[in-house]
Image (cartoon, coloured by chain):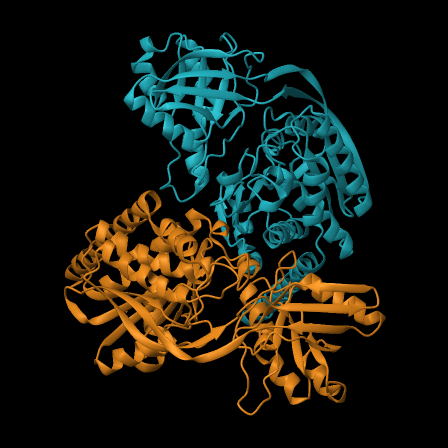
Chain colours: A cyan, B orange
Amino acid sequence: MRKSFFVLSFLLTSGLLMAQKEDSVFIRAISDDILNNGKAYEYLRQLTKQVGGRVSGSPNMVKAENWGLKTMQDIGADKAWLQECMVPHWVRAGKDVVKAMARGGSRDLDALALGNSEGTGGKYLTAPVMMVGSFEELEKRKEEAKGKIVFFNYKFRNELVQTFQAYSDAVKYRGGAANAGSKNGAVGVLVRSMTHAVGNNPHTGAMRYDSAIQKIPAIAIGIEDADWMSQEISKGTITVSLSSNAHMLPDTIGHNVIAELTGSEFPNEVITIGGHLDSWDPGEGAHDDGAGCVQSLEILRVFRALGYKPKHTIRIVLFANEENGGRGGDKYAEVAQAKGEKHIFALESDAGGFTPRGFGLTAPDDMFAKFMSWQPLIAPYGASDFRKGGGGSDISPLGKTFATPLAGLSPDSQRYFDIHHARSDVFENVNKRELLLGAVNMAALVYLVDKYGM
Amino acid sequence: MRKSFFVLSFLLTSGLLMAQKEDSVFIRAISDDILNNGKAYEYLRQLTKQVGGRVSGSPNMVKAENWGLKTMQDIGADKAWLQECMVPHWVRAGKDVVKAMARGGSRDLDALALGNSEGTGGKYLTAPVMMVGSFEELEKRKEEAKGKIVFFNYKFRNELVQTFQAYSDAVKYRGGAANAGSKNGAVGVLVRSMTHAVGNNPHTGAMRYDSAIQKIPAIAIGIEDADWMSQEISKGTITVSLSSNAHMLPDTIGHNVIAELTGSEFPNEVITIGGHLDSWDPGEGAHDDGAGCVQSLEILRVFRALGYKPKHTIRIVLFANEENGGRGGDKYAEVAQAKGEKHIFALESDAGGFTPRGFGLTAPDDMFAKFMSWQPLIAPYGASDFRKGGGGSDISPLGKTFATPLAGLSPDSQRYFDIHHARSDVFENVNKRELLLGAVNMAALVYLVDKYGM
């Protein structure tokens, strides 16, 4: 009994060791191929320089979809197609202008209308400024807001080491400033940009109007301008003239762009990997989320290059609309449900193409334990920090529909809010090796999920 | 007996927990102060923009020393002084030129004479090129080398995830190409730059001549030019004309710049923290090693700002000469020995101002175990990867002299060889938060060493 136990445990252990060895060899092959022959950086150059910024519903999104589909076909996907979905269609329609007249002189602020906002139809709206540090302050001083342009000067918290925490803390002002202002009779709102970056680069991003509210203009300004306003307001009243042509058009047709490697054993069990193809317009959507798109394409490329035949169906999805609607992810889950597909795992890269630091996973404990057991195989490639909690906006509907375990790549976050939704989100600010290493770590995780299931 | 054991173990455990709590609170205070009020980025702006590149022996080094001393005094060091040491004095003395005449046309290569090399005195040296991939290949084909310019085209290995491994693998060609060429009758050498960066940016760095050897010119070229040469050579002979004014002058006077917070309990037991003040000349020495210098100064600043009174003497040292001699570190250890000081710990930051990933420590096992026990306190600030083996060139003489445990900060290495010894090593390529976070992690480690000893 004891002897057979030892024999059995020897066989199990040696089998496990052999499997681990095989896995580490294959992951090394993935890494070597991507670091030496990877195309993600070249794909990103094409997407950013031949297409550029890609707001949902824009002509650039049509170009980007065609580019994505052709790239998938060129790589050699088993299937590649466009999946139609209706998307919001917001347009900036020209330059946003904010001029401030203060005691110390006047100043042209560096400004970007927030996404989804309604501008002034190009006319100038002039009003005195009321500065507040928070919603709570506005609530206390709400009698003063009527007829004013309310300036929300809430600062990004530098001391939060993980910058996404600072973003979560501050972004409610981008999303909700117009509602809070309008409810109290303000005629427009200005918002301090969601960043702690050096410089005065304004950052746009989605806002929303509550249904019953008067739609007032909502504009982000650079943080040096915000600091200047704050100083000037301490000396006396500031008047601002602002103009924006931004407006929402009727919903239009967009597409998720999808490639598939069909599973050899479980063709109806799907692993989804993706990022979102849409972006804001001031930059080129290089990190947000060109990086996630091209890293996903790189996984398709490297699996083809290494002749890897997945057991499960692997789908690469470039989602149609994340920034101002989440319609791409919704449509993908809806079609999957209608077709009776089984979605066993989804992985998103939507936190920039920076050096990989880890993965987050949202899944039950048994799956999380399995995920943790893979950490030693992946850590040598940089994504060593395996944590609970993760996913991405585009794949979250899969979680709701199928209880699919959801993972997100966690790149280093220190530089992300230097570029997020800003002019600086361009190809030149993406580092080739960092981008490729992200794809290495993602491909390694997908390989392990495909081999062992979740 | 059992009861008193439990009481004792309860007291020990609760004491330990209280100490850990106190440590985590103090480290949080360090982090909050540096991320909100840190000056390292401003110091780096001064060092790079008011001084610039700083080769040992250059007028810029004198400026940098004065700046360092004044900054230390302004921060409020207990003492600050210059420690004289003789340093090598190499000068580039103008533009390095390499023109290649090939079948497909001629090309001006982007070139930088290697540090310590002797140029042509500004005259043109013209000779056919012999390309080799390695020292071994030169050895096999050595009969061909006579009268030629030997071009060492050894490539940085992309597939090595840790870029310092690729550097260690390749840098022997920078250091030894001239000796290998000269020994076989070559009249000059060209070296493919030590980088895998995108672009054609040449990277300089130290080379050395063996004592009995004819000193031939040694010049680094950009990697796109290296690839072009390689292609052209496959089609037929290339002739190169090169010119460089580089030369070595007699040794001159330099200084280590030193600040001290005198220990309250153990004034003769020293903890040294530093980086090297000298740099190569094409850029501004921003990452290499302005970053290490200003992070060290930041530790002095934050300890002063928080009113921290160290038990041990803490020294900040901006070393006089690392790049082409290591004279600063040698002198510092020599003086310490002569004075009978005790050096209990040294920490260097000389791997760039990028996002911190860990620390390496060279120390006996018991000290290493203590170091590992601190990992959970530091990991939340980014430097989670605690490893065996670490230190830095400038502090290594302390290890030899006193068996001092030596640690090195390990920032993320993916971007380092984009800028190392190249024109791109400028302030603009340093990220403020990444730089400050490095200082946070260093200050936390120094605090723990000071409190608990090594």
Question: Looking at the image, is A146 positioned above or below residue A153?
Answer: above
In the depicted view, which residue is nearer to us: B191 or B2? Answer: B191
A159 in relation to A61, above or below? below
Q: Can residue A154 be seen here?
A: no
Give the image location of residue B232, x and y in percent.
80, 68
Q: Which is nearer the eye, A379 or B106?
A: B106
The tally of labels here is 0
Residue B182 picture quarter: bottom right
Q: Note whether residue B41 is visible.
A: yes
Answer with the quarter of the image where residue A284 lies.
Answer: top right
Left or right? Give the position of B291 relative to B178.
Answer: left
Q: Residue at x 36, y 57 (%)?
A: B294
Q: Is residue A193 left or right of residue A437?
A: left
Work out whether B110 lies above or below B324.
above
Q: Quadrant of residue A89?
A: top right
Give the percent coordinates (x, y) of residue B453.
25, 67
How far from the left and from the top, in percent, is residue A431? 59, 51
Q: Which residue occupies the foreground of this view, A98 or A141? A: A98
The quadrant of the image that shows the N terminus of chain A is bottom right
Q: Is residue B356 left or right of residue B66?
A: right
Q: Position of residue B10 (x, y in %)?
A: 20, 56
B150 up-or-down from A342: above or below: below
Q: Residue at left 73%, top 26%?
A: A59
- Residues B347 and B137: in front is B137
Q: Is residue B341 left or right of residue B377?
A: left
Residue at image point 63% right, 54% down: A440
